[in-house]
Amino acid sequence: MRLKTQLSGVTYSFKDLNEVLAKANEEKSGDRLAGLAAATGTEMVAAKEVLADITLADLRNNPAVPYEDDEVTRLDQDSVNDAIYAGLKNLSVAEFREWLLSYETCGEDIIRASRGLTAEMVAAVVKVMSNLDLIYAASKINITAHCNTTIGEPGVLAFRLQPNHTTDNLDGIRISTLEGLSYGSGDALIGLNPVNDTVESLSNILKMFQEIKETYQIPTQNCVLGHVTTQMEAVRNGAPADMIFQSIAGSEKGNTAFGLNAQLLAEAQDLMLKEGTATGPNVMYFETGQGAELSSGAHHGVDQVTMEARCYGFAKQFNPFLVNTVVGFIGPEYLYDSQQVIRAGLEDLFMGKLTGVSMGVDACYTNHMKADQNDIENLSVLLGTAGCNYLITVPQGDDIMLNYQSLGYHEAATLRELLNKKPISLFECWLEKMGIYENGRLSQGAGDASIFFGK
């Protein structure tokens, strides 16, 4: 395995594969903060050149965190289909990129190949791809999953309706939920981040979501995004949850900081299959975001793109209905500006799809970043073009509880019309029945939540 190269008469040497992966990464403030980034643009190019010649076998044989030290590594390595891997292992990273982008390589080919990949292979190829490469390759891949409805079918762009409230007030949540539905959002999920992570609070919100679904016969899914253990206790007490949520990390140490391990998530999955209210079989929901491991001191000296890829390898073990990166939520310490946020969003979407999970994105930013609403709207168009399964919407694009900016409910309709996308089919039929959709687009009465009060 060659770990050095020469550019313009200067020799660049790297101590190990993790250093190559880190320095080949596009500029990220988190890698700079961690002391992992290339010192110059030329060193980044040198690292990319070295990485391009590394084989997939080299990457499997040198996981970012050692097998014996880390549960995420063990699960990822042990789940590889060795027969499929055998047909890929001698490819260099550059050759793998060319195969992914080849006109002759279809989405089904890539989905099959994903069963022979590790997270490090997924992360490596991203580092030698441009933004357009990422969009084009991601657009080939359709990953479907079924909870109460099916997400990820071609030509569909779904949305999570996120009616967060600063005090978990049920009336406030109800009004926000109905407003979002009146704009055609909510086919991926009606999902709230609670202020109060208690069994009582989660149960009350879940019961209200279920009542809204049953009253208006809405074909969708519900979830309240408390800690996995709180949700499990609520379900055991009879709360009507369609899926269980948890934020996850790309290392065992990071997951420990989140208060979880694989055994706990397997127990949650089993509970939902036995006692949840969804049809299934996909009843888990995970969120990630570049920089999460660094923020908890759990990155093991590994760059944030590689750690993010490991999140998707971990998520895949539990057959999730939804996975999304909250791409700009952690802040400028990890993604400094709009250029870095846009790059990370495209990287994460492609890595999730290449891994084989139903992948969405929260196109978002915090107010102390060098980004604004126009940047996030630009990213949403790129993500929709790349075949993102779903995006997240909040009232007027302003989440007053989590204090960050995302897409608004009304942007859902704009993006679908602009990109010629549809809602999930059963949900689209419901929108037409309610008079919210007409001839494949919002009706004149859309956006008026009072339509629900007389029904």
Image: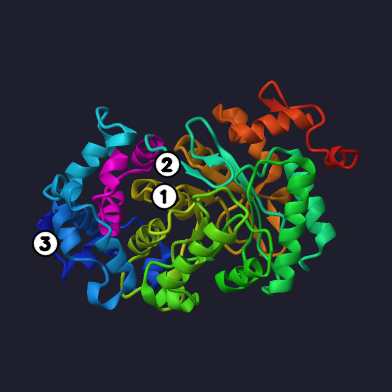
Q: Name the residue under label 3.
A: 4
Identify the element where label 3 is drawn.
Answer: strand
Identify the element where label 2 is drawn.
Answer: loop
- Magenta includes 409? no
Residue extent of the magenta highlight: 110-139
Which of the 4 image quarters holds residue 219? top right
Where does residue 443 sit, x and y in percent of width and height?
76, 27
Which of the 4 image quarters holds residue 242? bottom right
Amino acid tagged 2: Ile
Is 54 in front, or is 29? 54
Q: In this view, does 240 lie above or below 65?
A: above
Inter-mark Cα distance, 3 to 2:
38 Å
Amino acid tagged 1: Val
Which circle's residue, 1 or 2, is located before the other in the chain? Answer: 2
Identify the element where label 1 is drawn.
Answer: loop
Magenta part, dominant SS: helix
Amino acid tagged 3: Lys
Q: Do the CB atoms of the residues marked 1 and 2 lie less than 8 Å apart?
A: yes
Q: Mark 1 points at which residue?
A: 357
Which circle's residue, 3 or 1, is located before the other in the chain? Answer: 3
Q: In this view, does 182 lie to the left or right of 385?
A: right
Q: Mark 2 points at which residue?
A: 143
Q: Which colour scheme is used?
A: rainbow
